[in-house]
Amino acid sequence: MEDLNLRKGDAKTSIFGSDKMLQPAPVDKIPDGPTTPEIAYQLVKDETFAQTQPRLNLATFVTTYMDDYATKLMNEAININYIDETEYPRIALMNAKCINIMANLWNSPEQAKWKAGALAIGSSEACMLGGVAAWLRWREKRQAQGKPTDKPNFVISSGFQVVWEKFAQLWQIEMRQVPLTLEKTTLDPEEALKMCDENTICIVPIQGVTWTGLNDDVEALDKALDAYNAKTGYDIPIHVDAATGGFILPFLNPETKWDFRLKWVLSISTSGHKFGLVYPGLGWVCWKDKKYLPGSMAFSVNYLGAEITQVGLNFSRPAAQILGQYYQFIRLGFQGYKEIQYNSMEITKYIHQEIAKMAPFVNYSEDVVNPLFIWYLKPEYASKANWTLYDLQDKLSQKGWMVPAYTLPDNLENYVVMRVVVRQGFSRDMADMLLNDIKSAITELEKLEYPTPTRIAQDKSEKVTTKVFNHTGK
């Protein structure tokens, strides 16, 4: 006898023989009834197929590989809410241990057993917390002196990550940008100090600029700032945005002074889900001492069974990433992290070297200081080519690679660049595959008889910019 329920999706139904697979996935309205887990899984899984494979995505900074035990551990904690410290006290303890480890990696001078720091969803929230702490310290001091607090500002290079623009907008704090140029590719300390005044809450150097991969010279900034503060009577501090470099410098360049060894560095933020080697989202922020973490940033609730205090912008947050970070610290140790970061750097240097050999390209910097770098078309080549780096990006995407092309920040906006980020899980063989695909794409693009749409659009944009430049004289 025919089973009339067979195609509706019961335990005997073949997934691709069910009625559900003849219907589009829901867009606007929740389905009327339930679906078997096997069919629901397949519908969602199938929607992800037309994407770049994570390990071929050289645009993202986030971790795309963790070992099976780390993945198992995190999956087992996927239902744990970190904020429930009374229910999961060991998670809270692991979090505190991770903060200790991070602070000591950055040479914290704090003598307390538990260092001053906070968990964040990513480096963006960690930046926010560092910035808010600097603002509140400045405001409290100004209020104590009976001075106005309505015009705070902070100073950063134009190579900032977009979170700082969001921070400025949300808290109504003026963001003063030090322009980057081809001659000054990182934050110029003297130019930064020219933008400071009594309303400056902090200066933000970056270790691993998102746009270029370069590091600001924090030691030089600290030295110049020390003289400036002594001269003016100000006490402007430094918050280091070390989203990338915070997990690179301690392992590969421990002698470089950029962290709490410097007098005016009072807080540092980083991303655990980038070179901290944990799946997203995870960030960390540490302060030099508890006295630099304003008490007004701590909010408490008692409806979870006890008095729970939280510094972060969110209360509820996943515990899985804390376990993942603590696991990586135990599993890899200092030497393990060093070896992984070293391999990523060596492969980056190899790609950097090979890109420099290709006729169309020039690297933005001769140095590779983080596992990422950018390059652009040589001006003399670009003036005759019928293609742009956007066309190369498209060609590479057809091979499964995601290698982004984009314009640099203000003052360098005429430069279209490409960037690769090398992370754990990217091997030398994969690097050779990428380089071969780049060479093949160039060969195809050089055969074009007419300019591509992006070439035409870029030419028009450059003409407009040149016209405005000539008219204004700027």
Image (cartoon, rainbow, N blue to C red):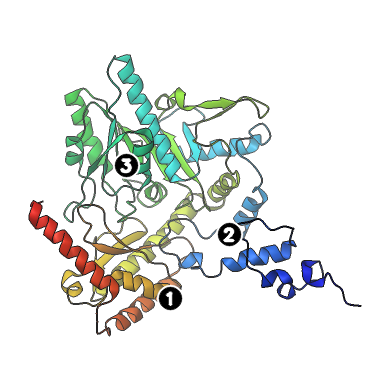
**Residue 354 visible in rendering:** yes
Q: Residue 409 or 220: which is nearer the viewer? A: 409
Identified at 43% across, 29% down, the residue is 110
Left or right, 3 with reference to 22: right
**Mark closest to the chain's N terminus, 2 or 3:** 2
What is the distance, in whole Å, between disc 2 and disc 3 at their CAs?
Answer: 31 Å
Could you say where residue 252 lies in the image, as x and y percent from the top left? 37, 52
Could you say where residue 403 lies in the image, as x and y percent from the top left? 38, 66
Q: Residue 439 or 224: which is nearer the viewer? A: 439
Q: How many marks do you count on the picture?
A: 3
Left or right, 35 with reference to 139: right
Mark 1 lies on a secondary structure that is: loop
Q: Residue 3 or 375: which is nearer the viewer? A: 3
Mark 1 residue type: Gln
* Residue on which disc 3 sits: 258
Crowding near pointer 1: few (<14 within 10 Å), some, many (20+)?
A: few
What is the distance, in whole Å, between disc 1 and disc 3 at their CAs?
Answer: 41 Å
Mark 3 lies on a secondary structure that is: loop
* Residue on which disc 2 sits: 67
